[in-house]
Amino acid sequence: MAKQPDSDSFMDMFGRFGRDLKLPKVDVEAILNHHRKNLEALEKSARASAAGASSLLSRQREMLQDTLHEIADMAQGYRAPGDPRDLMAKQAAFARKSFETALKNAGEVAELARKSGTESVEILRDRIKEAMEEIRTGYDKK
């Protein structure tokens, strides 16, 4: 067997291999284009997920800062000893406000996570639809 030049590209070797085996002609460019689109969709999906995670973490940090600020304000309100009923009323109001804020924040975090996940999945779902159409089109030509 004759020695092949070392400078053959993978595509040249792949094409020569197909010819040697007498395989049906394969549109290598179409295959590469198909996989390039798949990788681009994965990249876009990953970017969408990362952006969603970043916004989620940013919002959680803001929520934590707000909570710490409220706790500091509450602590300053307890400095002076006073009527135990007033103290209990303040504690109950703070507990109620904390619970309501926690519920609101949990809902907001869940919605941010849902939006982020949905966007990422939609990118992949759209690419799958495109890929299936490309496959159908390829079979229709034959």
Image: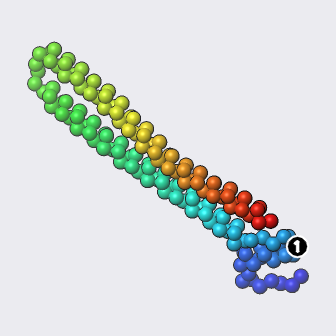
Q: Name the secondary structure under disc 1.
A: loop
**Can you say whether 124 is above or below 86 in the image?**
below
The amino acid marked with disc number 1 is Lys
Q: Which class describes the residues within 10 Å of circle 1: few (<14), some (14-19), or many (20+)?
A: few
Please give the count of numbered marks on the rendered protein: 1
Colour option used: rainbow
Picture quadrant where residue 66 is located: top left
Left or right side of 55 for 75: left
Where's the C terminus, which quadrant? bottom right
**Can you say whether 93 is above or below 22 in the image?**
above
**Can you say whether 136 is above or below 98 in the image?**
below
Residue at left 80%, top 83%? 4
Left or right side of 68 for 11: right
Residue 82's spot in the image, x, y percent? 10, 19
**Can you say whether 141 is above or below 68 in the image?**
below
Residue 1's spot in the image, x, y percent? 89, 82
Residue at left 50%, top 50%? 119
Picture quadrant where residue 64 is located: top left
Left or right side of 100 for 3: right
Residue 72's spot in the image, x, y percent? 20, 35
Residue at left 73%, top 71%? 28
Picture quadrant where residue 91 is located: top left
Q: Which residue is mark 1?
A: 22
